[in-house]
Structure formats: structure tokens, C-alpha cells
Amino acid sequence: MSVLPIDSLETPRFCGVPTFMRLPQATTLSGLDAAVIGLPSDSGGPYRTGARFAPNAVRAMSVMLRPINPYRGNINVFEELVVADVGDANVVPGYEIESLERIGESVAALVNAGIVPFAIGGDHSITLAEIRALAKVHGPIALVHFDSHTDTWDKYFAGKKYSAGTPFRRGAEEAIIDPAHSIQIGMRGSLFQRDDISQSIDLGYEVLTTDDALDLGPRGLAQRIADRVGGRPTFISFDMDFIDPSAAPAVQTPEAGGPTARETLQILRALNDLNLVGCDVVEANPLYDGPGQITALMAATVTAELMALLASQRAHAEG
Ligand code: MN
Ligand code: MN
């Protein structure tokens, strides 16, 4: 059984209620291999809030994307995977811990049904709730984390432990992430403290700066990632500020000097040999995106490339 998106050569893209890539909106979880879910919480954002608006902004731009991926042998993603858009998790605006609980429940419903979640954030704090749900089923998760920041700080503002800046320290502390098989990619820019990078290494993560990642090239980087996670259940978390602000200006905390849109997509298209159990694309903030909506377009494209990765892995597994 395959469930295909609305045919944009029959019904124009501007018609209808926009779901991700014009997929059906799920009425049941039965039979799904993967699901797109919006996690519209920005209660963990220390700087520009507004990521709560990203899921629908990304859906609106995702109508541009087509089902066949020419970078992975012309695979039709939706002939390999049954995917639907399951809508958004409910959240409690302004209440971080309560929002993480609700997000965790919504993601757990997918994970417990064997469905691979493709989440659209939300600020980066939401990833902790996703990985909590995944680790209950898969054990400690290998994390592949694209970001210009490590997000392994301990506390923010009045000693608060849950924030977009802390999920990967909490995940290591809760033993739901396996740092020894996890990698953080893309760090750059100025620091608050001299140990902003080394704190991640001290937790057990491998850390590659933007310069390290681009020096390796897409294939070299993909191999480094595959070697690090070594076939373990893997979660890819993609913070849109990994990308240069010229191609993704609408994020909470932009950092100058990042990979271009093309360099970013080359990296994602080179990824392989990953046992993908979940993905998220976080920190898009449509309030800063301007009329071209280029950050939302990039976020939709990143999500679609990660979906194509899963589709190609499944296709190869079936032989
Ligand atoms: Mn982040
Ligand atoms: Mn970041």
C-alpha cells in the first residue's frame, strides 16, 4: 500500500489545506511507516521566540517539494514509505515543562506504534521530549546533531534546567542519549565561556566545528557520522542555525559564517548507513522570515531530504 501526496500536476499547489508535502492528514496511525508532526513550542527559547509558528509555515512552503529524490537514485519516497501528516502536538504556551510533557505523549504515541517521527519544531528544547519517548523503546539513542551551538549548557536564567540551550546535557544526564556514539556538527561563533565546546566533549560527545565539517567534505563527513553511530538507533536533530544566515535568516540565534544552502543539502544527501528512528528540524522562526520565506523553504527541504534518507535505507534493506 502506498499513500501518495496530492498530484500537483492535477491540483495546483495553492489549492487546499497545506499538509507537509501535500500528504494526507492522518485519521489513524495504523499502517504508517513515518509521520510528520508539528511540535509548536517556543517556551524554551532564550532569545527570539516565534518558533511556535514554524510547523504551519514549513508546511505551507513544503508544497513546493516533489516526491521523487534524484540524489538517491530517483527514489519515490512515498512508494517506499507510508507517510502522513499527523498534525501538531498540543502545548501550553509559556510553560516549558508542561509543554515537554505533552510533546512527549504525542511523540510516544507514534514511537510506540513503530512509526518514525519527523518533527518540525519548535525551539530546540523539544528534542529532549522526543528522545525520552524514543529511548523508552530503543534504549539510549545515538544522536547526530547539526547546529552552530552545542546546547549542552547546564542552566539558564535563575537556574532553570530546561531550555533550547540545554537538551543535550539533560539527555546525557538522563542516559537517554549515548554520547559515546553521538556527534555534534557545525559549532562556530563567539562563546560565553571558554569551555562552551569542551563541555560537550567532557560529556562524551564528538564535536566537529563548521570548519571541521566543511573540510571533511560531504562524503568524508557522512562516513565519520556513520562510523560514530555504528548502526545504533539514531536520531538526527537539525537546528536551522547550522545554515548560514544568508540562507536561513529566520532562526532564534543566527551565527554568521555557516554552510550555504547547497553545502548543507550536499551533506544531507551524502548521509547513509544510519538506523534512523527519528528526526527533527527545529528553530525556524517565521516571524523573521520575510516575504520570500526562505528559512521555511529550507526547513521543508531539510525535512524532505531526511525522509528520503529513511526511504532509501528501507529500500536497500528490502533489497
Ligand atoms: Mn540548537
Ligand atoms: Mn543553535
Image (spheres, rainbow, N blue to C red):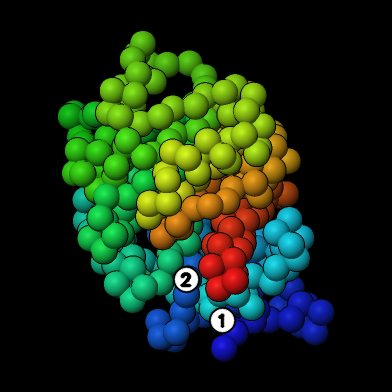
Q: CA distance from mark 2 to mark 1?
A: 10 Å
Q: Is residue 161 above or below residue 310?
A: above
Figure label count: 2
State the image coordinates of residue 234 (x, y, percent, origin top left): 41, 52
User: Looking at the image, is mark 2 or mark 1 earlier in the sequence?
Assistant: 1
Residue 266: image quadrant is top right
State the image coordinates of residue 278 (x, y, percent, origin top left): 42, 58
Identify residue for label 2.
35
Identify residue for label 1.
24
> Label 1 sits on what residue type?
Pro
Residue 10: image quadrant is bottom right
Going by the picture, which residue comes out furthest to the front? 319
Residue situated in front as seen by the camera: 195 or 224:
224
Q: Is residue 108 above or below residue 154?
A: below
Quadrant of image for the N terminus: bottom right
Res. 92 visible in picture:
no
Q: Which residue lies at the image location 21% right of the left edge and 50% below the top edge?
A: 97
Residue 137: image quadrant is bottom left
Residue situated in front as seen by the camera: 88 or 274:
274
Quadrant of image for the C terminus: bottom right
> Label 2 sits on what residue type?
Ala
Q: Residues within 10 Å of mark 1 (few under 14, many from 20)?
A: some
State the image coordinates of residue 295 (x, y, percent, origin top left): 63, 46
